Amino acid sequence: MPTDIRRTHWLIKLMLIVGFGFVTFDFIELTFLTRHTDEFFSWTIAAPITAAVFGSFYLAASLITLSAFPQRVWVRARSAVPGTYALVCLIELATLYNFAPFREHLHAAKGITNFEFWLWIGAYTVEPIGLTIGMLLQRRMPGVDPPTIEPLPTWWRNCAWVGGIGAIAVGALLFLLPNQAADLWSWPLTRLTAQVLGSWFVASGLVMAWAAHENDRWRLLVPALGFAVLGPVQLIAIMRFTDQIDFGNLQIWGHIAFLAGVTVLGVIGLSMALRAKRPMMAEAPPMPTVTPTATPPPAFTA
């Protein structure tokens, strides 16, 4: 009899689809109402370029959660989970540490602005708890992981490792030392926006590094789709507000190089994932067979 493949737990799927709704809503606001975050976002972002860059991250997260949600096989969905979990936990900490900007929206006269505040607080409270419980339950799911049929090219894995570790390092700097990191950045950042931006870099780096760790073309669909979109959309966001960027700062050129590399890896990875062979279900070892012994004919008796 074939051995069952480990499935994605329903609570993980629920958290992914809830997260999809939230990040899609924020993508729309930050991309199309970039200069109106004082009314249509959870806190006021003074620099429009920061809002636009956040919007590009939210779009990538929207595609990652949407593509991971229908995956019944756990190994094809799990590359979205470590990055998502890190993101919601870090942003929750950043929110609690920098709560002052949120008070203005909590006490705003307009109902939509109050709603934005409570939506943010609710999402970044429910998601960390739900994902924590979901990951614990996922570890108890029965079954096995399908075998790797087509490993990733060595050059792709190496680039993904370098990009992922680099993004995590940049994100950690922004999150842990926001004031110092803001001085090095090529456009204005506050302590809150620096830490939220750092959370996004850490999450993106984890998704990229996890894809390299999986080393499987068939499992690459979810992260590759996100990165194929993140690079060009964030480059467009930067081009929208070039007047706010200090192009004499080397940081922006490193940022652009990172986005170009992410785009290339995402497009090539997506092509590999769509053409990858679906692994066969692992089979349990065959049961030993016992050859029946011949029964001697009964002795003749008079």
Image (cartoon, rainbow, N blue to C red):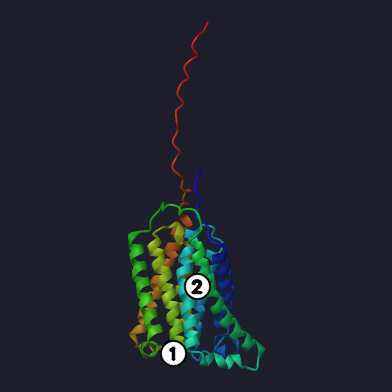
Instruction: Give the percent coordinates (x, y) of residue 299.
Output: 48, 11
Give the CA separation, mark 2 to mark 1: 24 Å
Q: Nearer the viewer, residue 141 or 81?
A: 141
Q: Residues within 10 Å of mark 1 (few under 14, many from 20)?
A: some
Q: Nearer the viewer, residue 59 or 17?
A: 17
Amino acid at dot 2: Ala
Q: Nearer the viewer, residue 4 or 25?
A: 4
Question: In the image as oriented, which residue stretches furthest toward the top?
Answer: 302
Question: Can you identify the residue that label 1 sits on?
Answer: 191
Question: Can you identify the residue that label 2 sits on?
Answer: 60
Instruction: Give the percent coordinates (x, y) of residue 34.
Output: 55, 85
Question: In the image as oriented, which residue stretches furthest toward the right?
Answer: 111
Amino acid at dot 1: Arg
- The first of marks 2 and 1 along the sequence is 2
Question: In the image as oriented, which residue stretches furthest toward the front?
Answer: 302
Report helix, strand or loop for mark 1: helix
